[in-house]
Amino acid sequence: MADREAMAALAAKHPDLDRIVHLAAHSGVRQSMADPYVYVQTNVMGHLVMLELARGLKELKHFVYASASSVYGANRKLPFAVADPVDHPVSLYAATKRADELMAETYAHLYGLKATGLRYFTTYGPWGRPDMSPYVFAKAIHEGRPIELTHLGFIKRDYSYIDDMVAGTLAVLDKPPADAGHRIYNLGAARSEDIVQVISLFEQALGKTAIVELKPGEPGTLQETAADIADTTRDFGWTPRVTVEEGIPKFVEWFKAYNRL
């Protein structure tokens, strides 16, 4: 993605591209503190390369890209709304995603790009990242290893099932701005789930009891997330349908099949 020559060759090969969904990124809060250079190279430089590619496509009607709920940073008002200030990121990952939003705003202003940023909340489901909590929980419970919960277990997350997020992304992609400009929307389940209750759903689906170790909070990690999706529902007619009570058993079913359990 950050390879300018490769992306330029791709654009030259497909000059009639009319829509882009740019989801590639280096994700995760903790890893951004361990390897900040790769996050800036991938998330900032890579995003710039994609914006340059987009502005060179004569037929392009819409550029949709992934931001993240992490941009809300130190905000305490819940649920998080797009109109809320996002000036205090608490992780480098969040800062890179906010930088992406600002660059898209600039390209819309300078070059008439029609762009929409989507702030995805905790997305899970089949083929989910192995470093995210659903996979970590399932693997630890299955293997009988402890799950470490930061903030002494007082954590809430807006767990959003992949099928809903795909449907929301496509709904946005199919409805570009009427005029040149840049928009931002939240995509999430709009339900803040207690992490202890989430773990109990994994226990039920796996038929095993979790071992939980409580830890203090970590720098950069948010204690609670919740999405205000009123604007998204109003403008695109999209609402999430899969609850955690349905989604986690589906994820566990895939987890067992994938790991041949």
Image (cartoon, rainbow, N blue to C red):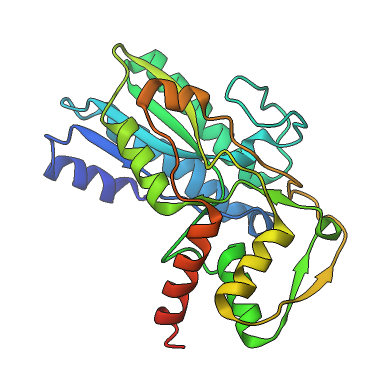
Nearest the viewer among 202 and 39 is: 202
Question: Which x, y percent locates residue 208?
Answer: 65, 82
Count of numbered badges drawn on the protein: 0
| 85 relative position to 217: left or right | left
Q: Which residue is drawn at 23% across and 34% down?
A: 19
Nearest the viewer among 174 and 61 is: 174
Looking at the picture, does residue 58 appear above or below residue 90? Answer: above
Looking at the picture, does residue 155 appear above or below residue 78? Answer: below
| 216 relative position to 253: left or right | right
Question: Which x, y percent locates residue 146?
Answer: 75, 79
Q: Quadrant of residue 92?
A: top right
| 241 relative position to 159: left or right | left
Q: In which quarter of the image is residue 149?
A: bottom right
Query: Going by the picture, which residue comes out furthest to the top?
Result: 179
Nearest the viewer among 46 and 59 is: 59
Q: Can residue 34 be seen in this view?
A: no
Q: Residue at x 60, y 70 (%)?
A: 202
Question: Which x, y percent locates residue 14?
Answer: 13, 42
Looking at the picture, does residue 159 appear above or below residue 257? Answer: above
Nearest the viewer among 259 and 108 is: 259
Question: Which x, y percent locates residue 230?
Answer: 51, 24
Q: Which residue is drawn at 44% across and 66% down?
A: 250
Q: Can residue 182 be seen in this view?
A: yes
